[in-house]
Amino acid sequence: MHGVAAMAKREHIPVMLNEAMAGLAVRAGGRYLDGTFGRGGHAEVLLARLGQQGRLLLMDRDPQAIVVAHQRFAADPRVVIRHGNFADLGEWDAAAEGLDGVLLDLGISSPQLDEGGRGFSFQTDAPLDMRMDPSCGESAADFLARASEKEIAEVLWRYGEERMSRRIARVIVGSREQGRPFTGTRELADAVAQVVRYRIPGRHPATRTFQALRIQVNGELESIQRGLLAACQCLKPGSRLVVISFHSLEDRIVKQFMRGPQAPRVSRGLPAPEVPESPLRVMGKQRLDLIAVVLLLPAMMSSAIAVVWARNENRELFIQLTRLQNHRDQLNIEFGRLELEQATWADPAHIEAIARSQLGMISPDPAQVRVVRQ
Ligand SMILES: C[S@@+](CC[C@H](N)C(=O)[O-])C[C@H]1O[C@@H](n2cnc3c(N)ncnc32)[C@H](O)[C@@H]1O
């Protein structure tokens, strides 16, 4: 099988399908968005719950997913399809009209991993690409060819939580400097395996490196932050936002977003600024059975689903939060200044200067000084 037929055939088994549908509480006449179409596992079930008046908006940044979306659902008058990043949801008129529910199933799909040519997997040898949307941005090979050693190490540490990040970065840059930049998945995976001494059973030593590069190349964490905001701006009052996250970095962003602004930490002694109430109400939370995750996506360790109830006060709330954060920063600067000033007061030279200038005291004549030894 080749081309589109093969693409459609490669399935993605939707994780937490029932939980996601329960979270969305689909109403037959509602407008819903599946912002991560993949191969349409969730979209298919969602569509089956919609009546003739219902609408389903489908989006994915991977052009291959969009080809499948057209193939499967373009003939259905209730469906609208768009290729793009869910972070830019607000630019889509069909979404900006208002939504009753948004579903985001984060990460990559099984076909993306399985199709060797995409460069996501170290199981097959392929060009080191890793872009979900190969029509824009830089590939993983481009990133490794231009980034400094420090930048590469930071990416591996921050997005892969890779303990050997510095050593891997050194190997990557060293090879590049000898005229052998990494351009293929297998050569990179093999090189990383030589550096990473620790072993986790059932896990390739390059798993963390590949996850980190993928997150970097696709700007995934930033997209999630922007996407959550954009989704809340499109959601109608009383609507639902369902997010399925896989690794701890995504999970943290989603949970922080749901919790809303937290009381910022201020230096001791300063009044804590008031924090506005979150516009999101968490309705349920479940951790995915680890065994299921290991079977489906060995690279991913954990997953969580979060269902939240959204009100459209979100924008105002974030403006308030930014204001509060600025205020806190100013207070912290002022506090630091005061601490410095306090320290200079304790300085004998400073005390002497004040004694001279404000109390009119003068240093004694050396002849008047008698040194007493005890
Ligand atoms: C885990 S899969 C979704 C699978 C889908 N729920 C299904 O049932 O087939 C994630 C999909 O989201 C897409 N994706 C990831 N980040 C995205 C983003 N920022 N904007 C749009 N699509 C994104 C990926 O290209 C991938 O196809």
Image (cartoon, rainbow, N blue to C red):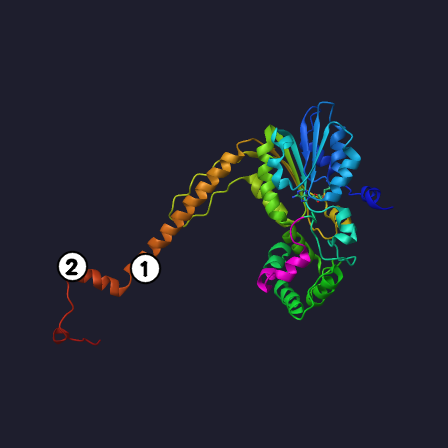
Q: Report the predominant secondary structure element of the magenta stretch.
A: helix
Task: Name the residue at the right extreme.
Answer: 1
Name the foreground residue: 17 vs 143.
Answer: 143
Does 140 lie within the magenta span? yes
Quarter holding residue 38: top right
**Boundaries of the magenta span:** 136-153
Q: SS at mark 1?
A: helix
Q: SS at mark 2?
A: helix
Residue 339 image offset from top left, x and y in percent = 35, 55
Residue 45 image offset from top left, x and y in percent = 76, 33
246 displayed left or right of 370 = right
Q: Residue at x 78, y 53 (%)?
A: 116
Residue labelled with disc 2: 359
Residue labelled with disc 1: 343
Residue 235 visible in rendering: yes
Label 1 and label 2: CA atoms lie apart by 21 Å
Q: Residue at x 77, y 29 (%)?
A: 76
The amino acid beneath tag 2 is Leu
Does 14 lie within the magenta span? no
- Kindly check if marks 1 and 2 are in contact, taking CB atoms under 8 A apart as contact: no
Neighbours of disc 2 within 10 Å: few (<14), some (14-19), many (20+): few
**Above-or-below relation of 96 to 193:** above
Residue 14 image offset from top left, x and y in percent = 75, 40
Name the foreground residue: 14 vs 82.
Answer: 82
Residue 332 is tagged as: none
82 displayed left or right of 326 = right
